[in-house]
Amino acid sequence: MDTIYVTSPLLPDLNEFEKYLEDIWAKKWITNNGQYHKQLEISLAEYLKVPYISLFTNGTLPLITALQALRITGEVITTPYSFVATTHALWWNGIKPVFVDIEPETGNIDPSKIEAAITPKTTAIMPVHVYGNPCKTKEIQDIADKYGLKVIYDAAHAFGVEVNGKSILNEGDISTLSFHATKVFNTIEGGAMVMHDEKTKKRIDYLKNFGFAGETEVIAPGINSKMDEIRAAYGLINLKQVDKAIESRHQTAIKYRNALRNVEGITFFDDIPGVKHNYSYFPIFIDSKKFGISRDELYAKMKTHDIFGRRYFYPLISEFSTYRGLESAKAENLPVAHKMAESVICLPMYAGMSDVDVERVIECIL
Ligand SMILES: *Cc1c(COP(=O)(O)O)cnc(C)c1O
């Protein structure tokens, strides 16, 4: 039997990709804001229903660059329940992360706990729409407005997610995306930043190109995080099939939910009314007392059946050596996050997952 991995990348049609490559070879323009880079920005802005977007080489650099662009310093309130890149981006800017606990309904930062974590040094809030579940953006914005804080959303999981017909990516001051191979939409490695106005877009475009504002003018200590033409072309082709891919993921989610709904000791997230989900992950949460075996025992059992789930997000970011010394990283400050991290397994979830494979995963669990 074949191994079932937690994900499988969405690949563009190879023949179509070859045609783009031939064109790139003919024009000999392979990076630096080329034709396909420009086209992908336009196509993505339209698809995602956002006014401005800037492409990056991955999903970590737009986080780091957003903090630079908004001149964030001091302390930033964030979630421990995410991929490490969220907090690393703060560290790379010399900013102290302040962890706040999450809410059990979504896995996202709990707005009711944010105010208690604000100090005179706080300059921003950096939440994550974890698994593509939308954060309580209104509550977060109200707090930010009250205290004069910026809000930067790590929206790496939230490609295409909408609330009442509006893109979640328009919330806050800036949102960032990852187009890594494992994500819903990928450009192999890649990412983007979403902003509200042309001025910010221009500044970000300078910052991702060393700060160059012209041939001889450098306006800020920028970085190099431009997406190249080959990945942009790959992205243009993948964008055409992303709706189909999300629908395929949706069907898998329906199958998992139907099979696991009444299983004692297993819980999962249901769709939220008014939200257009992207089914980026399918986390289940194991209550070992009720289920009979622990999360780690189930995880190991799946492995023996050649099924690779992933414990996203375990350990919590606040448990890694770099961060565990922080006052806000103490376990008693983060009980909900600890509980979730200790009970989660993300089941295999990707476009085109066969019925046979979904069935194998379900049977292994039951
Ligand atoms: C994937 C991911 C990132 C980093 O993106 P890369 O493209 O791998 O650099 C950042 N934050 C979250 C929540 C992610 O899942």
Image (cartoon, rainbow, N blue to C red):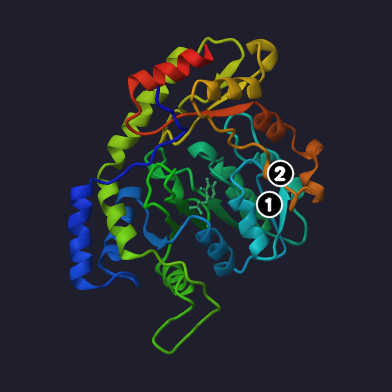
Q: Nearer the viewer, residue 153 or 364?
A: 364
- In the image, residue 110 lies at what x, y percent? 65, 39
Q: Residue at x 54, y 79 (%)?
A: 220
| Extreme-bottom residue of the structure | 216
Residue 152 position within the rendered picture, expressed as x and y whole percent measured from the top left? 56, 55
> Is residue 268 shown to the viewer in this render?
no
Taking 124 as reference, is 285 above or below it? above
Q: Marks 2 and 1, how far apart in space?
A: 7 Å
What secondary structure is marked by label 1? strand
**Tag 2, which secondary structure?**
loop
Instruction: Say whether residue 253 is left or right of residue 95.
Output: left
Which residue lies at the image location 75% right of the left edge and 49% below the top edge? 321
- Residue 244 percent coordinates (x, y): 28, 35
| Residue where numbered disc 2 is placed | 100
Is 259 placed above or below 226 here?
above
User: Where is residue 359, by image quadrant?
Assistant: top left
Residue 123, numbered label? none
Image quadrant of residue 251? Answer: top left
Say if residue 228 shows up in the picture.
Answer: yes
In the displayed structure image, the side of residue 325 where residue 146 appears, left or right: left
> What kind of residue is marked 2?
Val
The reply to whether dot 2 and dot 1 touch (C-beta < 8 Å) is yes
Q: Which mark is residue 77?
A: 1
Along the line of sight, which residue is nearer the eye, 300 or 211?
Answer: 300
Query: What is the crowding at mark 1: few (fewer than 14 residues within 10 Å), some, or many (at least 20)?
Result: many
Q: Residue furthest front?
A: 1
Name which of mark 2 and mark 1 comes first in the sequence: 1
Question: How busy is the neighbourhood of tag 2: few (under 14 within 10 Å), some, or many (20 plus)?
Answer: many
Say which amino acid is labelled 1.
Ile
Residue at x 23%, y 48% (from the top left corner): 14
